[in-house]
Image: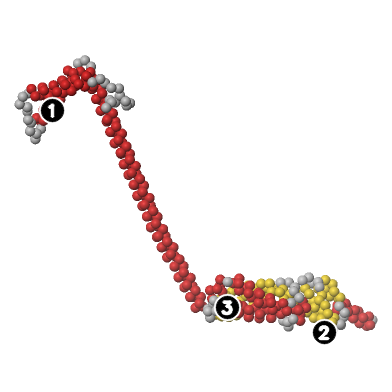
Amino acid sequence: MEVAVVIFVVAVIFVVRSVKVVPQQNAWVVERLGKYHATLTPGLNFLVPFVDRVAYRHNLKEIPLDVPSQVCITRDNTQLTVDGIIYFQVTDPTRASYGSSNYVVAVTQLAQTSLRSVIGKLELDKTFEERDIINAQVVQAIDEAALNWGVKVLRYEIKDLTPPQEILHAMQRQITAEREKRALIAASEGRRQEQINIATGEREAFIARSEGAKQAEINKAQGEAAAIVAVAEATADAIRKVAEAIRQPGGEQAVQLKVAERSVDAFSKVAQDSKTTLLMPANMSEVSGLIASAMQMVASVRATPAQPSSEPGGRLGR
């Protein structure tokens, strides 16, 4: 009975040491008698009991690793407290087992030294503006060295950049001054645009007024010209009608009567004006002679044959 129990225990130990099940995304390094023998892939694997042993177990997933914060000095001698996080992955389990005693510590230390080197080449303002460049340079520096450790560095991200308090206060004052400067510039630009708009409006208004005055003068001149033409046409028509009336029977006597009436009216108006000196003719026959002269002109007009008008409305030809 005891022998059976011993045999069973030995069998169990034999099975446990000889059968290995590797999980997915894992790699186990096997040593045979202290020397590298093989790398077990995910699934069922068999070993030689008491000869082979699993020396290293590696996780092949992407691993985030927090990089402790450290003080870095920029190119302009400003201290910065920087911390970040690095993402890496084991790509060669054999090198990860024998290339470094502890690749996690090696990657962390290399990330810190690379970060100090990169920030030391930049000024303070550039460190805030060029985080992507810093991350890329740190990844490049770590990845070149990590190849011998069987590790692939995927990316590095800066979590925080903290300058000293006095630098923060100075930066805050600078930002405030810059904002005030932009506000003053914006206000001055607004006043400048306002003056430009006012000047433009006044110029356009002056042009509009001058155009209106010009058009008004043109309209006035056209109206005056039209009035002169109308008066001339009316005068010509009146003269034509008078001439035609004179040629009618009894027209001469009517003209004599009209001339006599106009003469009497003229003398009466002159006599009514107290400031006017009236000179009466010594011989009243002179008045009748004046009337006779007017009648001779009327007779000559009557004897002249009427010429056809060359203009619309019956104007007399010159």
Quadrant containing the N terminus in the rendered view: bottom right
Amino acid carrying label 3: it is: Lys
Q: Quadrant of residue 235?
A: top left
Foreground tag (1 vs 3): 1
Q: Earlier in the sequence, mark 2 or mark 3?
A: 2
> Can see residue 230?
yes
Label 3, residues with CA under 10 Å away: few <14, some 14-19, many ≥20: some
Residue 34 numbered tag: 2
Q: Secondary structure at mark 3?
A: loop
Left/right of residue 124 with respect to residue 5 in the rendered view:
left
Quadrant containing the C terminus in the rendered view: top left
Name the residue beneath numbered marker 3.
121
Q: Quadrant of residue 106?
A: bottom right
Name the residue beneath numbered marker 1.
266
- Asked if 21 appears above or below 267 in the picture, the reply is below
Amino acid carrying label 2: it is: Gly
Amino acid carrying label 1: it is: Ala
Foreground tag (1 vs 2): 1
Considering depth in this image, is 37 or 133 the residue closer to the camera? Answer: 133
How many labels were placed on the picture? 3
Q: Secondary structure at mark 1?
A: helix
Marks 1 & 3, CB-CB < 8 Å contact:
no
Q: Quadrant of residue 278?
A: top left
Q: Earlier in the sequence, mark 1 or mark 3?
A: 3
Marks 2 & 3, CB-CB < 8 Å contact:
no
Considering depth in this image, is 79 or 7 the residue closer to the camera? Answer: 79
Q: Residue 63 in the image: x percent, y percent?
A: 70, 73
Q: Residue 89 in the image: x percent, y percent?
A: 72, 73
